[in-house]
Amino acid sequence: MTVYSGPVFEMAVNQFNVIANHLEIPFDERDRILMPKRAVTVSCPIHRDDGSVAVFEGYRVQHHLTMGPTKGGTRFAPSVDIGEVAALAIWMSWKCALVGLPYGGAKGGVNVDLSTISRRELESLSRRYMQEMIPFVGPHTDVMAPDMGTNEQVMAWFMDTYSMYQGQTVTEIVTGKPVSNGGTLGRREATGRGVAHLSKRVMKELNIDPHKATAVIQGFGNVGSYAALELYQFGLKVTAVSDHTGALHDANGLDIPALIRHASTHGSIAGFSNQLAFDPAEVLTLPCTVLVPAALERVIDAKTAENLKCRILAEGANGPTTPEADLVLDKRRDEIFVIPDILCNSGGVVVSYFEWVQDLQQLFWEEEEVTRREYQILNRAFDQMLARAGTDKISHRTAAMAIGVEKVRAAKNTRGLFP
Ligand code: NAD
């Protein structure tokens, strides 16, 4: 038992053990690579609109500071606990190392149901959370970004709160900011674009004609909506989409630009069409070419994995597939091409890295340059993953994670015990 114990953390531990066994890492080295360097829990009291005071619990976990600052998103959701945050921080470390960024992983979050707070209360909570984090973060210590339930506006409040404390504007303290506050062009679209880019690469490898292909997307927030749009523009029919309010299905293909307009006005896909309403529980197992889980973790368990009818599983979300499901997918390797989360959704942190670099240098790039460099990094990591999976005869996830874990291990071993 550790302070992190819980289902999501156990999943990160189990995945790591598979990699550590594969790499034959000695047992006395494993905890040092796996266990987070530090974790902070804070209380965030705010005034509610009715004058009362409510206290929310917030967390930040920094996995390792061996290769540079830590980097990771901040999640505002009712599911958030320290174990989930720790698991997400660990996955960020493997991801950053896989794609070659000079970061360790971090993650943070506040346990809050956003449907129960107003916009003013959200601003108070965001500012209070950052205020509590000031002793633990910094542009060269730990750089935050958005995740589920947070967005550009929340990042702007974080940046403003940190900057007011420093007495100067410190744009490089967070990424995923509005462009008007030092954000980069192409960050909003980066994760979904990366998911779509890698899906297209796999379609090419498998000789699939995009105009005869279909896509199904679970989650229609930042990642899901941009992945859907890119695939739609590439010629695929997006036949089903779901979010926390329900699902829509149209065998002829949904009008994704119209759905994005609807969701940005109404906050969800609810009310777009009664005729197209569909059972959200059946979305993941619909027949399709590309399946993109882009909402929560652990949505694909062993039973769902048995029933998947996609050709490509493009993991937009973090941790959507359980280790038990991985065993099933291993057996179905010839039927389903898995693009594992730490590669598939890494476009987000890659462009966050570009944003940090641009802020530090105060030299800003064109969107075309951002996206071209994003795809270049994704292509390199994809090639490395495929090559490793081929030589070691292992799954794509094991290959991707092995590359990440190896890099962190090498950096730790050459530096010494301290970082
Ligand atoms: P978001 O808050 O913008 O969107 C989340 C979406 O999931 C919403 O549409 C929500 O309605 C939907 N959802 C919630 N519960 C659901 C359920 N039970 N069934 C179906 N849909 C449900 O979040 P996001 O930033 O798009 O993140 C989604 C996932 O992608 C998370 O796992 C996140 O960690 C991961 N991710 C995000 C980024 C990024 O840049 N935003 C980068 C890498 C990974």
Image (spheres, rainbow, N blue to C red):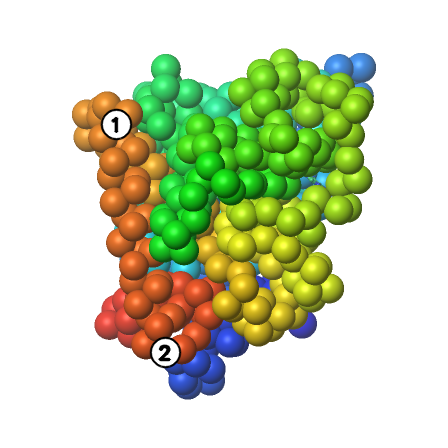
Say which residue appears at 55% left-offset and 41% top-offset.
214
Q: Earlier in the sequence, mark 2 or mark 1?
A: 1
> In the rendering, which numbered label is found on residue 368?
1
Pick the front one: 10 or 216:
216
- Give the quarter of the figure containing the C terminus: bottom left
The amino acid type of the residue labelled 2 equals: Asp
Q: Position of residue 327 (x, y in %)?
A: 60, 73
Q: Is residue 111 left or right of residue 203?
A: right
Pick the front one: 252 or 267:
252
Pick the front one: 237 or 303:
237
Q: Position of residue 326 (x, y in %)?
A: 58, 67
- Give the quarter of the figure containing the N terminus: bottom right
Say which residue appears at 51% left-offset and 50% top-offset.
314
Q: Quadrant of ligand 1?
A: top right
Q: Position of residue 305 (x, y in %)?
A: 66, 62
The amino acid type of the residue labelled 1 equals: Glu
Q: Is residue 85 left or right of residue 366?
A: right
* Residue 374 visible within the image: yes
Q: Which residue is mark 2?
A: 392
Q: Is residue 156 left or right of residue 318?
A: left
> Disc 1, ligand 1: is the CB inside 8 Å?
no
